[in-house]
Image (cartoon, grey):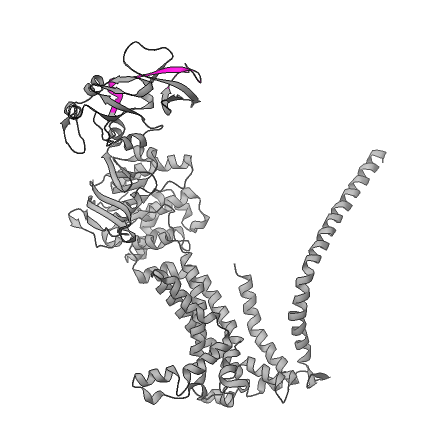
Amino acid sequence: MGSFDVISHCMTSVSMKDVSKYFDGGNTVANYRLNLDVADGEFLVMLGPSGCGKTTALRLIAGLEQPSDGAIYFGDERVNSRSPSDRNVAMVFQNYALYPHLTVAENIGYPLKVRGIPPDDRDRKVEEITELLHIEDQVDKKPGALSGGQRQRVALARAIVREPSVFLLDEPLSNLDAKLRQEMRIELKRLQNELDITTIYVTHNQEEAMSMADTVVVMNQGTIQQIAPPQELYKRPRTAWVARFIGSPPMNLFQGTRHNGSIDLGEAGTVELDGVMDADEAVVETANQDDASAASVLANSAQGDVAVGIRPEDLALSATQPSSGNVIEGTVDTIEPMGEYILVNISVNDQIVNAKVSEWTVSTDERVYLTFDDDDAYLYDDNGELVG
Amino acid sequence: MSLRDHIDGFTGDHKLGEDLNVDREKAIAIAVFLVPGLTLFMIFSVGPIVYSAIGSFYAWDTFTMQDFVGLDNWIRSLTDPLIIHWSNIREFQYPMGALTHNLLWVVVHVPASTFFGLALALLFADLKGRRILRSMVFAGFTVPPIVIGLVLMFIYDPQAGIFNELLRVLDQGQWVRNWTQSPQVAIYALIAGGIWVHTGFSMLLYSSALSAIDPSLIESAKVDGAGPWRRFWDIIWPLVKPVTAVVVIMGIIWVMRMFDIVYAAGGAAGGPNHAYSVLGIEVYRAAFRPEIDYGMAMVVALIQLFIVAPLALYIARMN
């Protein structure tokens, strides 16, 4: 793709300050005290399960909903009461929302027409954008005659043709098949790089989020769980909920009780705390105490419920009991050969634990020992906050 | 030819015969299933139409068919001032003839009820309590038209009528009159009542058409920068256009068949000196009131059919 000179950048940062949204007179809380900063040209992905309020958050930014509380800023300007068109946002809807009675060219040209751009300029821009998105052959068709992928491209074209300051996408790939989704993912990312428009993208698909985002916002039950770049999200999930949400399969969490310096995991065994706490940084952030040292957090309450988290890819498996290190004991439940790795599901304390291994060394119903490095273990307190 | 070929040929023929048998069985089954419906259709639709079409070319002694008279009934009916009153039309004086009155209904009632139906549907679309409001507006259409006619008589009553009372309250006493009996305005009074009734029907069709529009299309238009007016003309109107065809044609059919409201207000004469008579009234009077003119009744009924049938056909063939 060459340079696209139609788009002249007018980049905008977006921020939400304590934004809440209630429906039904306050009975339904869609969003609660969202705080979010999106930088100029950033690709931000809101990720969460369905019903977590991510789409409502996007609609608040679009101006299709008004916040019940808090303020939304575009740059330095408060935009709470501005209409979507005043905010100069463009949005791609999950079902594309193409106007069924207009041709592809008319659909793409519509935002320009509304803005009173002369037909000649309009046609030129539509031509450029359709070439950019490889739909120049479809311009005279009605949306009903297009395939899902083509409709997707038309929706994208309509959104970017008028040089929006913020580009909003609501699950834009969820109606496509897996192969097409992968292709569009790459293309979208490239398009965003090229146009350098501030982009907010909503999805429930973590693969999409991780692969495209500069920053991922993980949401659950109307609140933000964590804001981090994809790698950090994977490396340091701040809450047990995020840990369980990110990764495929997600992190294994073992519930246990802390006894001065070690964690009792019931039948599965005991894990020495020292190692876990020494690993990584000694300084962690918790909800109540920023930058408190891990040791002091633990010292505050020498006993209590905790969860130890280990990613499936960090677990090693052996049929014989290792002499030292962190060991968890369980029984092999099922084995799923996935090709690039083998997924072993192990029953530990009536909980299924996933381990990704490269070689098939165990068999079903066998008693096995799971080992892991101190560095790979995460420790969550009884509020689900990461402490180590 | 070998024996084998004979056998092949034979079985081939046999197979062909079997196929025919299957087709025949199907055809018989289809025919059997069609019998009840077709019978009723013949007796109540095709029969009377054919009977009228033939009868319209014959002279009648009350209900007895007499001699073939060619186009006599047709010429007599179409030149009858009760059907088309040319000199009054030129002076815009009522009565102008039943056919003219019917066409006036079409020209005034149909656009008005279509417009109000769409306006109410749009107004109610995002309102709380829209179901109740819709039901209230639609209720008028569920009432038998003869009752509507009687209700209109009450509304327009010179003494007790709410319409005249309203004029008095608004200090417009000079307008107070017996609306349904004043030849030059009565037809508009009745058309106004018809519009009220039929608006409910149009509104209901438009409401369902509006609710079928994907809300994200409207939101997309908002994001694209279209204001309410543009959203209506560019998005909503094109998408409810097919329904408009149905609403308009159903409206035309409804007013071409108009009888009850006019009968309730003006009796079999269709108002004082036939001031707002319609074709339905003329058919009724020609057929059942002395002097009985069966030939004319058939002709007028066929004229109604000629106007309504193509419209009905168009609706039936719409996608």
Residue at left offset 15%, top offset 26%? A300
Residue A104 position in % (x across, y down): 39, 50
Image height check: is A132 above or below B59?
A: above
Q: Is residue A35 magenta?
A: no
Residue beneath the point at 23% across and 31% down? A385
Asked whether A369 falls inside the magenta stretch, the response is yes
Where residue A89 appears, as percent x and y from the top left, is 26, 49
The vertical placement of A253 against B156, above or below, is above
On the question of residue A182 being in view, the answer is yes
Is B231 left or right of B14, judged from the image as shown? left
* Quarter of the image where one finds residue A368: top left
Q: Quadrant of the N terminus of chain B?
A: top right
Looking at the picture, tell me which residue is in the foreground, B59 or A25. A25
| Boundaries of the magenta span | A357-378
Left or right: residue A322 compared with residue A198 = right
B110 is higher (above) or lower (below) than B173: above
Quadrant in the rendering for residue A225? top left
Residue located at (38% from left, 40% from top): A174
Residue B257 image position (x, y, % from top left)? 54, 75
Viewer-closest of B197 and B99: B197
Give residue A282's position: percent from left, percent from top: 16, 22
